Each structure stands twice: as structure tokens, then as C-alpha cells.
Image: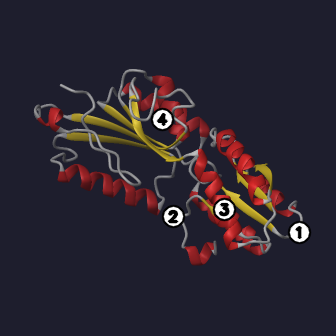
């Protein structure tokens, strides 16, 4: 029987074959899920519902032939480690880890339980997998973005706001361990668009306010990374966008499902 037998549909969808597991329906299968976002976040609940519905379409019904153990870290670094240890102790058939902090935490606790990752950054460079085509080990999944995309962000920004010359990138280093990977790509691409880059790591609300207030006069762009990069998550992406709007800065975010675009005015 193949261990990797669950189909995971999350933020786009990931897929593993189910045929092998379906051959033994008498044993209750168990899946652990570790998410970055808080449990009561509306977008999180949408994802949880979609995940359950996708499994049901494939013949897996929670409480009948599969059990799903959810943990929601809400962007809290210590909770990632605590919840990862709890899930591994349950000895599930597989663990779904969403965002880099969750992946790092789960990987620290097991090298045998299959881990499906989503919203990952640079899994090859971080040594999680041998390659995207042939991951090897106990991890497989999908990346959310790659270095070449950083240059595309700047290109689109230049087309939308040609006068922009200075770019500020806001992120939380506590929950964005991928920051150096993305920031290097942005800094490398900036000269070709006549831009300079300022990195603005923040750890709390005061840091967000202070980083914006320290920006020089326009033209300037304020960007932020929200997948594993804000305090505590999607709500703060709205806060950053609102601050950028207040200061009349062009703004951008990787994802802001916690608020409508008309509210964030991105």
C-alpha cells in the first residue's frame, strides 16, 4: 500500500493518488492539518469546507473512513512548534502543512510521516526536496511563488505607476523565514526598472506604523508579504494597505482575503 494516498485541495489544490488507500476502507485514516491562519478567519473556514467537500467527492467522509485533526497557529511562532508536535504524536497517515512556518515546524518533528506542503517558498533551496519534479524524502507539494515573480511585480508596478522610484518591502521576519530569498530577488531586479529597494522588517503594529512614517516623500511603493509574513496574518495585510492609502502610497499585497479590495484600496 502506498503511504501517499490522499488528495489535498487547498488554495488551488494539490493531488496524491487515492486508489491504494481506498483498497482498505476498514481502517480509519487520519490526516493532520497545520494552518497559518486563525481558526475563526472566514477565508480559513472556506478552505476547510472546500477540503472536506473535495475528500467527500473522492469517497472519504470525515467520521466514517477518515479523521482530520486541524491546528490553527494564527501566525504565532511558538504555536507552530507546539501544534506540529501534537499532530506528529497522533501518528497520522499524512500531514498537510500550509505556509513555510508550518512546514518547517512539522519537518522538525518527523522525517517519516508524509508531509504535503502548500504555499511554500523555495523548497529546493531550503533542502526540503531534491527537486520539484522528484522531491524524494517524505515531502511533496506546491510552491506559491518563485524568485522570477519578484521581477514581474516590479515590472507591473512600473507600468501602473511610472513615477515610482523607491520600493519599501514590509515583512515579519519571525514568520517569514523566506524573506531573504524574496528580498534578494527584488533587489536584483530593481535596477533594471530604475528603482531602489528598502527592506522594512517589522514585528508588531508599532513597527508597521513606524515603517510607513519613516518613508521619504513620493514617489514610493509599499509592498507586504502576507503568506506567513504579517502580524498575525491577513488582517494585518489590510492594516498595511490602509496605512499605505493614508500616506498616499501605491500599495500591494500578496493576498488579502480578510478584507474586500474596496476596503483595502490596493
Q: What residue is pinned by disc 1?
A: 217
How far is the residue under mark 1 from the one under mark 3?
21 Å
Q: Position of residue 158 (x, y in %)?
A: 71, 67
* Mark 4 or mark 1, whichever is nearer to me: 1
Q: Position of residue 164 (x, y in %)?
A: 78, 67
Please indicate whether residue 210 sits to the left or right of residue 243 in the image.
Answer: right
Which labelled disc corresponds to residue 155?
3
How far is the residue under mark 2 from the one under mark 4?
24 Å
Dot 4 falls on a residue whose secondary structure is: helix
**Residue at the image position 63 percent from the left and 49 percent from the top:** 229
Q: Answer with mark 3 or mark 2, whichever residue precedes in sequence.
A: 3
Which quadrant holds residue 113? top left
Q: Position of residue 205 (x, y in %)?
A: 74, 56
> Are the residues tagged 3 and 2 within 8 Å (C-beta)?
no
* Mark 1 or mark 3, whichever is nearer to me: 3
* Mark 2 or mark 4, whichever is nearer to me: 2
Q: What residue is pinned by disc 4?
A: 83
Amino acid at each position: 500500500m502506498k503511504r501517499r494516498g490522499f488528495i489535498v485541495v487547498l488554495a488551488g489544490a494539490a493531488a496524491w493518488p487515492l486508489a491504494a488507500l481506498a483498497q482498505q476502507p476498514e481502517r480509519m485514516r487520519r490526516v493532520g492539518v497545520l494552518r497559518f491562519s486563525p481558526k475563526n478567519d472566514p477565508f480559513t473556514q472556506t478552505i476547510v469546507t472546500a477540503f472536506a467537500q473535495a475528500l467527500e467527492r473522492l469517497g472519504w467522509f470525515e467520521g466514517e473512513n477518515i479523521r482530520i485533526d486541524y491546528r490553527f497557529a494564527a501566525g504565532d511562532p511558538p504555536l507552530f512548534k507546539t501544534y506540529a508536535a501534537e499532530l506528529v504524536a497522533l501518528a497520522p497517515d499524512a500531514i498537510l502543512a500550509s505556509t513555510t512556518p508550518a512546514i518547517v515546524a512539522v519537518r522538525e518533528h518527523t522525517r517519516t510521516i508524509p508531509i504535503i506542503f502548500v504555499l511554500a517558498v523555495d523548497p529546493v533551496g531550503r533542502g526540503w526536496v531534491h527537486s520539484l519534479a522528484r522531491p524524494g524524502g517524505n515531502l511533496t507539494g506546491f510552491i506559491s511563488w518563485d524568485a522570477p515573480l519578484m521581477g514581474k511585480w516590479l515590472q507591473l508596478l512600473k507600468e501602473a505607476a511610472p513615477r515610482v522610484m523607491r520600493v519599501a518591502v514590509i515583512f515579519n521576519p519571525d514568520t517569514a523565514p523566506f524573506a531573504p530569498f524574496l528580498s534578494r530577488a527584488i533587489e536584483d531586479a530593481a535596477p533594471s526598472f530604475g528603482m531602489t529597494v528598502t527592506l522594512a522588517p517589522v514585528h508588531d503594529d508599532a513597527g508597521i506604523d513606524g515603517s510607513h512614517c519613516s518613508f521619504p516623500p513620493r514617489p514610493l511603493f509599499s509592498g507586504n508579504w502576507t503568506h506567513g509574513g504579517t502580524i498575525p496574518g491577513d488582517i494585518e495585510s489590510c492594516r498595511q494597505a490602509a496605512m499605505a492609502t493614508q500616506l498616499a502610497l501605491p500599495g500591494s499585497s500578496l493576498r488579502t482575503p480578510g478584507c474586500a479590495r474596496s476596503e483595502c484600496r490596493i
